[in-house]
Image (spheres, grey):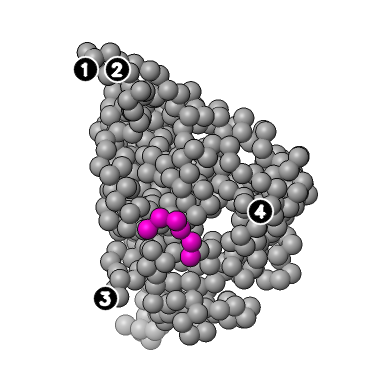
Amino acid sequence: MDNATLHEPLPLSAPSPSLFSSPIFCLPLIYYALPALLAYISLCSLFRHRRLQDLENRYPPATYARLTPATAQRIILTFAQLEAPFIFETSLQFALFRTYGIPTISGLLEQTGLLGSSEHAAKRYVDTDVLITEFVAQKWGGERWAGAVGRMNAIHAAFGGGRGDMGNKKAGGGDGAGEKGKEKGKGKGMRIKAEDMLYTLSLFAWEPVRWTQRWEWREVSDLERCAMGVYWKGIGDAMGIDYSFLPGGQPTPSENGHGDGAKVESIRGWRDGLHWMDELANWAGQYEKENMLPADCNTVIADETVALLLVSAPPSLKPFGKKAVAVLMDPHLRTAMQYPTPPAYLTVILHTLLHMRRLILRYLCLPRPEFLRVTVLADKPDNMGRYIWGKYLGQPWYVKPGFWNRWGGKGLWRKVLGLPVPGDEGEKFMPAGYRIEELGPRVGKRDWETEKVWVREVGERGCPIGFGSRKRR
């Protein structure tokens, strides 16, 4: 063998076949991404309505007339804490905000200083939020639920509202709801009108439905709307709200059934929660037309509330944020608040973002699992009987000063803006928590314990829709 043969390079071996050299892996990425995306969307669609379907199978339309408030509450909490927590919470906040478009309501709040000054507005707003969340989220008929409703009753009673003056149907706009609503609402002896109590109840029943229809990934079902009616009708009963303004609340004399010829007076009642909701919506719409009028007191209370909502915004963006809030108002409410019409471009931007959110949730998000249920209330009190609150906007009332609350993203941002975080300023913001009987202003004609007894008695009733109060004539 010669030297040329010895030094001749050996032939390179052919590369062994690889999985990634297969022609299928040479296709563009879109050929894999598109089927995967479609499969994921199909999976989301398959499971997105499963929770609602289970409820509708359990409670078909034939059961609507027999729904109890306890059952209705469970249906509402499934929706509020698992299906649409953000929109549900926002809609209740906006329901409270919308009441400020009625001069007799905003005038009373300004006159008493409950929300008309920045000194009191933050705590009063939080106290109202806590009370409403307590009786929405706590078990119907339970001690804590009765305590929250009872505390609200005691506050209303101090101003002649609800059970404080059952005959106060036309009481007191006083000087606060003068002709065309332009007065500031500082008249003496101003009282809560029975119509304003019913109107406020209508907003808490209907705003979650309206906001969900407009901005959420699905509409409110008939079952959920019926549950809203049953639950809030029951809350109205516990608060002593007058339903005689509704057709179903009109008295109908009848025999007492004992054969003695005596008459009893009952109300016509409603077929189910849907019937009550429809009557309430019709009445509230007409009430708004007649009573939602421009007034300076509306603007004062609205400005204080918007300032709370925007407290964590940089100062340079607060004017923009105020215009964004105005986008969410309908023209009638904006006129009553004396707010200018927002720029068209801002309306387009905000509506587009909300619609994009709706599409993303509908087609690209799986249902929220049970372990991510949204709650902000402490399950149990501490050894002093106080409860911790799980959120804050303006000031950190009742929030525990843990590491995350003080040094998390929100805490650090508030420090940059010079705003207090949980644990700042000693005991000023009550970081140890709240007792239900201490919430709200220190007013009330009636003892809190007495109110709780009344509320518990109402809580023991069955379906509140088909019957009303009866009395011998």
Q: What residue did someone put label 2 on?
A: 262
Provide the secondary structure element on which disc 2 rests: loop
Q: CA distance from mark 2 to mark 4?
A: 44 Å
For the record, the magenta segment spans 442-447
Q: Residue at x 65, y 65 (%)?
A: 117
User: What's under tag 1, amino acid-wise?
Assistant: His
Verify CB contact (< 8 Å) between mark 4 and mark 3: no
Specify which label sits upstream in the sequence, 1 or 4: 4
Mark 1 lies on residue: 258
Measured as percent of width and height from the top left, residue 457 is found at: 27, 44
Cα distance in 3D space between marks 1 and 4: 49 Å
Residue under numbered circle 4: 188
Alpha carbon of mark 2 to alpha carbon of mark 3: how far?
A: 55 Å
- List the residue tagged with mark 3: 383
Q: Amino acid at mark 3?
A: Asn
Evaluate whether residue 70 shows in this view: yes
Q: Quadrant of the C terminus?
A: top left
In magenta stretch: residue 276: no
Cβ–Cβ under 8 Å for marks 2 and 1: yes
**Residue 292 higher or lower than 408, as above or below:** above
Kind of residue at disc 2: Ala
How many marks on residues? 4
Q: Is there any visible trace of residue 207 in the rendered image?
A: no
Element carrying mark 1: loop
Q: Identify the element where label 3 is drawn.
A: loop
Quarter of the image that includes the N terminus: bottom left
What distance separates the C-alpha of mark 1 from that of mark 3? 53 Å
Q: Would you identify the image quadrant in which residue 180 lies?
A: top right
Q: Nearer the viewer, residue 17 or 79?
A: 79
